[in-house]
Image (cartoon, rainbow, N blue to C red):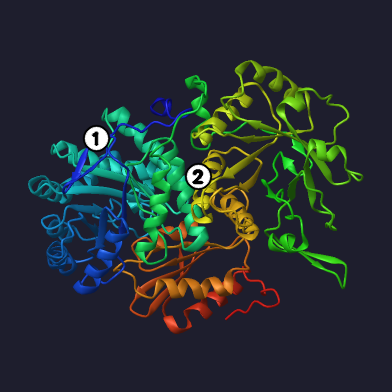
């Protein structure tokens, strides 16, 4: 992990080779490029050109177009010519699966081709095959024979290539030897990369995509280690989370996966895959990328390389004490920030999942109701359910006439002045990690007090630009000092709107949860440009969405939904909406909605049930990897999906007011 040593405590781009895609330069510290993919039928030249133009005008610097067969690959030429005639010179990328001859045609036309090593030559039938070393090497030679012609065409025409591994479409050969693992993803790409390098072809970009951000992040890190160790250099990296879905959830999942890597300076081009029209992906990309255009590193001390093992995939993190419902083996808590004047009201509580019924004097509590509210210096003068605790700033807590269910939040200076013995458990301590005002000398007494204080919950935040690295460095400091108190992440957004704030929250806290840290989250919204009352429902939903996307706390149905493309066999947006409408109450169930078979069956490995296009108007239903029904007419497929859920004990009747079927 030495390659990451600089970026663990400060923001610094990873050095990569420079690749030319037409006139566009990728890697080698060039700006992080933004791209998307058309969803039209590639044979519909007019529609594809029109959609490509919308994407370019929205800010796309590359536009990818699917070419599933020879005829689509050949039609890339009139598409390209029409765009150039209209004055659009943005590089085009052909997306290839299964068909080497389509790739060889496309490589002579467009500026870049994307191949998937899992299905470009190999096949996927979910078969386990035992290979001797000799037989395995013979398979590699077979790949060399089939792949080398494309490499030579790309080299001759100056065409760039992306070797794009997908977690959901690893070949049976790779799965048989390496399993469904990040190292299998890496080796799948490295096999093709070695062949390309043997032909002295280096105009290559790589990607390691998954619908699971944890798997994605680990795969990219392993890929960099492998390239550095074996080749002595790194190729530019294309970042993306596959099948992220739509709306808020899709944006959160994409921001966590892509942002975790961007925070460490990894990534040269990004694509946010949403089940929406492709031009709507671009603003999310822009908001992600602009975080890194003016970032300044705060005064975070360096760390020794021995601590880097804490970030490796699956490495155990230090156990934390259990305090009330915090720490230990309990799921992370959510703290709703209701510290603004007037925020502690019944209407606000209703917005975050606590619904009070005056007629019965009872509370209805939703699955995404926060565990605590932070009231700051504001008195809570309304009834609260007994399950909901309040955190007050320490001076306000001191004046509270009734301290039942109320806990103090100390600033560090005040905490150091207090005796431990007379404080309730838990009590909270806010620490601004490595701010310019804090000194290294004051940290050791604080760490020593934490070690002796079994009731303290540490609330970490940072006012530095590189806040995530600052907090991560403090977490490693706490671990090295044998401090085992639970940790909450307090994340403030000063962005001008909730769209950009969502990305800010997801990146800065999601990266830490991905790495196995954290026992809770509190999202706070401050904006001088936007003085409106925060959307408390949305902020609370984002907090739970971050925990869901990082697989640390499951509170709702999860949808693994592809972004649609020219291969899609049904209206993906409409179908996703229909399925979500009737299944969104199934807490913890993972449903994959895939437009075609390219990644569909593979991504079933990360889903409980699957709805996959298998032909025009036809759907195949899966349970995990197992096909349950083939050729289901689209008109009844959603109803059949519900029956499949019922047959496998995954269905519960929706609450009153929610319809199904």
Write down the quadrant of residue 31 in the picture: top left
Camera-side residue: 386 or 72?
386
Q: What residue would you read off at disc 1? A: 17
Q: Is residue 97 visible?
A: no
Give the tally of numbered discs. Answer: 2
**For the residue labelled by badge 1, is the local secondary structure a helix, a strand or a loop?**
loop
Is 171 above or below relative to 204?
A: below
> How far apart are labels 2 and 1 at the CA level?
26 Å
Residue at 55%, 28% in the rendered image: 473
Label 2 crowd (10 A; few <14 / some 14-19 / many >=20):
many
- From this viewpoint, which residue is outermost toward the left? 156
- From this viewpoint, which residue is outermost toward the right? 401
**For the residue labelled by badge 2, is the local secondary structure a helix, a strand or a loop?**
helix
Q: What residue would you read off at disc 2? A: 507
Label 2 or label 1, whichever comes before in sequence order: 1
Residue at 29%, 44% in the rendered image: 206
- Return the x and y of residue 197 as percentages of the image width and height: 18, 37
Write down the quadrant of residue 343 in the picture: bottom right
- Return the x and y of residue 588 as percentages of the image width and height: 61, 60
- From this viewpoint, which residue is outermost toward the top? 441
Camera-side residue: 568 or 533?
533
The answer to whether 568 appears left or right of 326 in the picture is left
Marks 2,1: beta carbons within 8 A: no
Camera-side residue: 141 or 322?
322
Residue at 26%, 35% in the rendered image: 28
The answer to whether 498 appears left or right of 162 in the picture is right
Label 1 crowd (10 A; few <14 / some 14-19 / many >=20):
some
């Amino acid at each position: 992990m030495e390659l990451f040593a600089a970026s663990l405590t400060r923001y610094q781009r990873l050095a990569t080779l420079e690749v030319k895609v037409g006139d566009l330069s990728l890697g080698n510290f060039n700006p992080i490029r933004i791209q998307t993919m058309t969803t039209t039928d590639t044979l519909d030249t007019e529609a594809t050109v029109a959609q490509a133009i919308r994407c370019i005008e929205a800010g796309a610097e590359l536009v990818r177009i699917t070419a599933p067969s020879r005829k689509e690959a050949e039609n890339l030429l009139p598409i390209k010519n029409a765009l150039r005639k209209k004055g659009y010179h943005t590089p085009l990328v052909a997306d290839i699966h299964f068909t080497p001859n389509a790739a060889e045609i496309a490589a002579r036309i467009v500026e870049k081709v994307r191949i998937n090593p899992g299905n470009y030559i190999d096949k996927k039938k979910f078969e386990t095959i035992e290979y001797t070393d000799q037989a395995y090497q013979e398979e590699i030679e077979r790949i060399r024979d089939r792949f080398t012609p494309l490499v030579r065409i790309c080299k001759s025409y100056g065409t760039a290539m992306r070797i794009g591994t997908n977690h959901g479409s690893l070949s049976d050969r790779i799965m048989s030897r390496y399993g469904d693992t990040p190292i299998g993803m890496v080796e799948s790409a490295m096999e093709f990369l070695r062949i390309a390098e043997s032909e002295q072809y280096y105009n290559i970009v790589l990607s390691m995509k998954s619908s699971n951000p944890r798997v994605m992040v680990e795969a990219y890190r392993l890929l960099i280690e492998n390239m550095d160790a074996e080749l002595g250099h790194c190729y530019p990296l294309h970042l993306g989370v596959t099948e992220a879905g739509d709306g808020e959830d899709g944006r959160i999942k994409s921001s966590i996966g892509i942002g975790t890597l961007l925070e460490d300076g990894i990534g040269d081009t990004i694509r946010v895959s949403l089940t929406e029209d492709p031009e709507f992906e671009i603003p999310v990309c822009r908001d992600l990328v602009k975080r890194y255009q003016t970032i300044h590193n705060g005064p975070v001390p360096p760390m020794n390389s021995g601590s880097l093992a804490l970030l490796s995939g699956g490495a155990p993190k230090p156990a934390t004490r259990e305090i009330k419902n915090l720490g230990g083996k309990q799921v992370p808590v959510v703290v709703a920030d209701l510290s603004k004047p007037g925020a502690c009201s019944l209407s606000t509580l209703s917005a975050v999942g606590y619904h009070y019924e005056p007629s019965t004097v009872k509370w209805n509590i939703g699955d995404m109701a926060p565990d605590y509210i932070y009231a700051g210096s504001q008195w809570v003068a309304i009834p609260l359910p007994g399950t909901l605790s309040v955190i007050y700033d320490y001076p306000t807590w001191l004046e509270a006439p009734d301290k039942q269910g109320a806990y103090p939040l100390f600033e560090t200076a005040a905490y150091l002045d207090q005796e431990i013995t007379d404080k309730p458990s838990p009590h909270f301590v806010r620490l601004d990690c490595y701010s310019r005002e804090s000194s290294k000398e004051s940290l050791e007494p604080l760490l020593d007090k934490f070690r002796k204080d079994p009731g303290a919950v540490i609330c970490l935040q940072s006012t530095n630009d590189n806040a995530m690295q600052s907090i991560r460095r403090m977490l490693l400091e706490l671990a090295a000092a044998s401090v085992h108190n639970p940790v909450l992440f307090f994340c403030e957004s000063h962005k001008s709107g909730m769209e950009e704030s969502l990305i800010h929250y997801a990146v800065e806290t999601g990266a830490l949860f991905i790495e196995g840290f954290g026992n809770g989250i509190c999202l706070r919204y401050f904006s001088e440009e936007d003085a409106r009352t925060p959307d408390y429902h949305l902020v609370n939903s984002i907090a739970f969405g971050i925990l869901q996307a990082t697989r640390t706390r499951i509170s709702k149905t999860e949808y693994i939904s592809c972004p649609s493309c020219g291969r899609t066999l049904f209206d993906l947006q409409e179908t996703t909406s229909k399925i979500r409408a009737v299944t969104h109450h199934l807490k913890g169930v993972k449903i994959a909605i895939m437009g075609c078979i390219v990644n569909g069956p593979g991504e079933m490995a990360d889903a409980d049930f699957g709805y996959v296009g298998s032909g025009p108007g036809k759907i195949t239903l899966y349970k995990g990897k197992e096909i349950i029904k083939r050729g289901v007419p689209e008109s009844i497929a959603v109803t059949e999906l519900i029956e499949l859920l019922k047959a496998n004990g995954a269905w519960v009747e929706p609450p009153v007011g929610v319809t199904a079927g």
